[in-house]
Image (spheres, coloured by chain):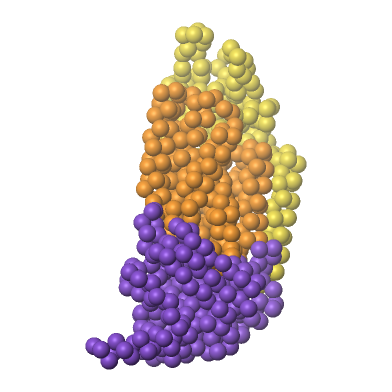
Chain colours: A purple, B orange, C yellow
Amino acid sequence: MISIEVKDLSLGYEKQVVVKDLNFTVHEGDYLCIVGENGSGKTTLLKTLLSLNEPLQGSIVFSGGLKRNEIGYLPQQSNVQRDFPATVEEIVMSGFAGKNSRRFFHDESQKKTAKENMEKMRVADLSSSSFSHLSGGQQQRVLLARALCATEKVLLLDEPVAGLDQQSSTSMYGLIRDLNREGMTIIMITHDIEDVLQDATHVLQIGHTNRFTDIKTFRSGRKEEDHVG
Amino acid sequence: MLAELSLYLSFPFVRYALIVSVLIALCSSLLGVILVLRRFSHLGDGLSHVAFGAMAAASVAGLKNDMAIVLPVTVATAVFLLKNGKRGMIKGDAAIAMLSTAALAFGYLMMNLFPTSGNISGDVCTTLFGSTSILTLKRSDVVLCSALSFAVLLIYILFYEKIFAITFDEDFAKATGVDTARYNLLIAVVIAVVVVLAMNLVGSLLISALLVFPVLSAMRLFASFRNVSVFAALISVFCAVAGILISILASTPVGSTIVACDFVIFLLCTVFGRNG
Amino acid sequence: MKKPFLIFLLVFMCGCSAKKEEVPPAEKEEEVEETETTDVDLSFGSQTITYATISNILEDPQEYMGRTVKMLGTYRQFYSETYDTYYYVCMVTDATACCSQGMEFKLKEGSSYPLDGQQIILQGTVDVYQEGDYWYAFLKDADYKVY
């Protein structure tokens, strides 16, 4: 059983602490939603989980055979180059780059997996299309297909529906829900917890105080607030 | 005209020039793809100025083979500027501007204070604009250049997938296990080598054109990374050969003629292209 | 798609290296040019080629030793106090006109030299002479026509 255990984690830049004393554990098959104010350190946390940042203090432990290059990542929309000359297929295949340290070229099985992932994300018919000519929703699905090529176990998503219209958002959340049902562990930063209340298993609130709760507790807590307010 | 051309082709240094230009054009266009798409376009220009400074230092020191100083200095600078990858570059933009202008000024100052030949402005002119240095290559120059070029090409082909991954999305590549530090280092070294080689062809000031124009032209016509790379290489080689032949027949400066060809092709691609 | 590209590149690389090996022998065969007496005729051609050839000759005279060269340039005369001699030079500039090179020459016995600044077509045989510590290339047994 794979798991990611975060202990007494403090994050920040150049000695400026952004998040303090984070403690939580994610188990195989969980669907964790990370919420918080802008600037509260959500993206920093994600990047630290991905070893893109160094924590100021504390530790992150991967167990159950989970390796660093087995985590998929869907970055924030704004960070991706929109007008990069590449086809959908080329981008999806780049998800395998981290797995080919000893090989120089992709092999047939990777091409097959890529095709399957594109079909899952409903972008298979766009495989020779130029990425820059796709709609926002299509681009996100392509990038999700890429993330799936990098992992079969854990997926980290940073605001996957930011900038998408209602229909594309619903579609996106549906795809993520399906992946979770098939066993993929999901860790997702989102602004709209409402939309995924039915799908999530845990919620992590980051801010002045950090709160890690399972979804039932979170929902009943919410009901109380509504009741009181 | 054909007779004239075949006469010129009988000169060994003309053949050397064509061989070397094809190789340099190939390498610089492929490197240009990486530079432009990672938004490092200034890097080629900055490095060429540093190389100029190093070249001036070498000639003042009386070194016959200036490659011994120029290559290591340029490589070290490239590594220093690129070692922090994408993040380093944002701060590095100002660093490039500083380093490159300082090197240019320093180089020119040294050449004036310690002249090693009677024709200072000529030497500077040659290094900055590459007038006929490509036509005065010796066999050993060609061998060295060819070896380096083949190495660059081999690296680009072998590491193509990783280069693509890092160029498109460095964070994702790093997050999913690509050793981006190692590849950034490799790219830095290769860029430095190509810049030093390309200085022979078009001179310091025009290197950016050689790196940048073929890519931009190709991007107007093609949408996949592979096609853009291949076509950029083809355009670059065509312009280099055409540029040299035209400059020989019409008595125009070699470097500027090549860049002019690149620019004309770019305009054509923009007019007839379908992308943007 | 990778493989054909690789194969193309390998063939290209082989082609290039084959080309390089041909160079030394081809050099000797093709050097017999238009007129019977001139090996290297630069008189009608490209300024770029002329300048480059002269640069190459000056850089490495041994390569061109004994060959006759015909060139178009401007005659200049220089006097050196250190060595108390006159230098007779045929000057050429490169395409950007920011650089110039001079091919020294010595006319056949009894000939008179042109006027300073005249455009001449010069023909002579490549040879070297020593002055001080250095060897210099020059055209010997030369003659000229005013252009």
x%, y% of residue B17?
Answer: 59, 45
- The percent coordinates of residue B216 (x first, y second) are 45, 63
* Quarter of the picture holding the C terminus of chain A: bottom left
Q: In which quarter of the image is the N terminus of chain A?
A: bottom right
Q: Residue at x 58, y 80 (%)?
A: A28
User: How many labels, in total?
Assistant: 0
Q: Is residue C39 above or below residue C10?
A: above
Please report the residue visible at 54 percent of the width from the left and 43 percent of the height from the top. B75
Q: In this view, does A94 lie above or below B11?
A: below
Q: Is residue C119 left or right of residue C4?
A: left
The residue at the point 45 percent across, 78 percent down is A188
Above or below: residue C74 compared with residue A141:
above
Expressed as whole percent of the image width and height from the top left, the position of residue C140 reads 62, 21
C115 or B236, which lies in front?
Answer: B236
Do we see residue A149 in this rendering?
no
Above or below, C32 relative to B42: above
Q: Give B40 or B257, whichever is nearer the viewer.
A: B40
State the residue in front, A31 or A98.
A31
Is B62 on the left-hand or right-hand side of B144?
A: left
User: Which corner quadrant of the image does residue C104 belong to?
Assistant: top right
Q: Can residue A210 be seen in this view?
A: yes
Q: Position of residue B195 (x, y in %)?
A: 52, 47
